[in-house]
Image: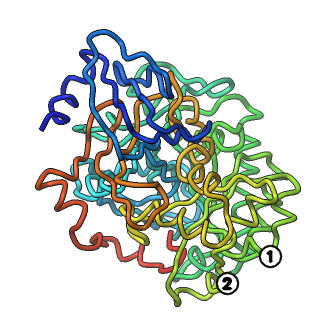
Amino acid sequence: MMWAWLALSAHAAPVAYVGATLHPVDGPVVEDGVLVVEDGKILAAGTGVVVPAGASVVDLSGRHVIPGLVDTHSHVGGGGYNDALKPVQPGLSVIDTIDVSHESVQRVRAGGVTTANVMPGSGKLMGGQTAYLKLRDASTVDDMLLCTPRTEPLEVPDDGPLRRTHVCGGMKMANGTNPQGAGSDPKSRMGAAFLQRTALAEGVEALADGPPDAHDLDALGLAEVVSGQRTVHFHTHRTDDIATILQLRREFGIDVVLHHVSEAWKVVDILAADPVPCSLIIIDAPGGKQEAQQLALHNGALLEQAGVPVAFHTDDPITDSRLFLRSAGLAVRAGMSPEGALAAVTLVPAQMMRLDDRIGSLTPGKDADFVVLSGPPLSVWSTVEQTYVEGVAVFDRRTEEGQRLATGGAPEVTDPDLLHAHGGD
């Protein structure tokens, strides 16, 4: 159990992982590479790297090492991710429903995921604030949050926890059938667009009067969106719904990532004209809701060729995070480049979450989040052997617990509102 000991000692001395094939993502593949980790950061990665004096050496010959996977759309943590307070609820935060001790968090790491954007569901037009989580061992959700300070004109007094003084995620919005009906407004796409446009306009008007009161949670959430400090993660499928989002983006200048985008293949030229990042779900079984019926595996390939930033996501539990790399592999089968597909689960999603200065590639200075694989990243035969977050092993397949997490049954869905198959929440 040498590696388990090294995990505990990761912050005491450098560790050099030698002999593996390194996939830096932001550079060429390195055969027989050396990855040096110290104090939770990548000190060096490449070939010809000098192992520091006093470093512990771990032989990874025959293995492949990739950056930790970044999932832009997940519902792990065992919470209730749909709430029906009102159609637009920008002050609601998913942070308050995440249970970091929930087994789903452990299971995600068995798939190599080290960072996740945990989202509210798509039952409301603005479902609430998302949480960017670094999946380190933690006692509370606050210990996992990845946050950036609020900037002018939204600075608030430094008189509370990190989540009060910083922005620690994005904003979930949705259109299409999920937020319609259910006994309340809106009942149509035009009603949905009207309510969303009205809310964003209220955010603009509020900012014109100066920074909102930090205790007015709805006003603050809207202000963060219209000032560009909180990225909107927008659930959408059909081309008409995609067009609506792009219009809102033009009107209000909001920072948007499109999620699911089932019919992207129909509007590639529009998405490429002013490239808007697209986070895609890969579903390889028939069925599902009507508006996702024309989802296509070649969405990733077409968008990549057109210069549109492409990421993939799990929508866990809609797809199992332990099979996340399989999404990238299926995209390659449909025509995407292997390099683009691997970037779509590492560096590109990190960019969509504005975290690429810390994660997403094996770059010196970035966090030591990496995954040890038994074989090439996109091979169906490869398995995740170890997952490291900031230099600490958070999953090891060789242990009894690791085997159980890696090979156990499908994720339990505890929130019935998440059961929107083929495009989910």
Residue, disc 1:
266
Answer left or right for 333 relative to 43.
Answer: right
Residue 362 at x, y = what percent?
50, 34
Residue 191 at x, y = what percent?
72, 74
Q: Which mark is residue 15?
A: none
Q: How many marks?
A: 2
x 54%, y 56%: residue: 89
Q: Is residue 418 above or below residue 65?
A: below
Between the C-alphas of marks 1 and 2, the distance is 10 Å
Residue 92 at x, y = what percent?
47, 51
Residue farthest along the top direction in this orientation: 53
Which kind of residue does numbered mark 2 sit on?
A: Gln
Answer left or right for 93 relative to 245.
Answer: left
The secondary structure type at the circle numbered 1 is: helix
x 42%, y 67%: residue: 380
Residue, disc 2:
294
Answer left or right for 160 relative to 303.
Answer: left
Asked whether disc 1 touches disc 2, contact meaning CB atoms under 8 Å apart, the reply is yes
Residue nearest the observer in this picture, 167 or 188: 167
Residue nearest the observer in this picture, 118 or 13: 13
Which kind of residue does numbered mark 1 sit on?
A: Lys
x 49%, y 38%: residue: 168
Looking at the picture, the colour scheme in use is rainbow
Residue 404 at x, y = what percent?
17, 62
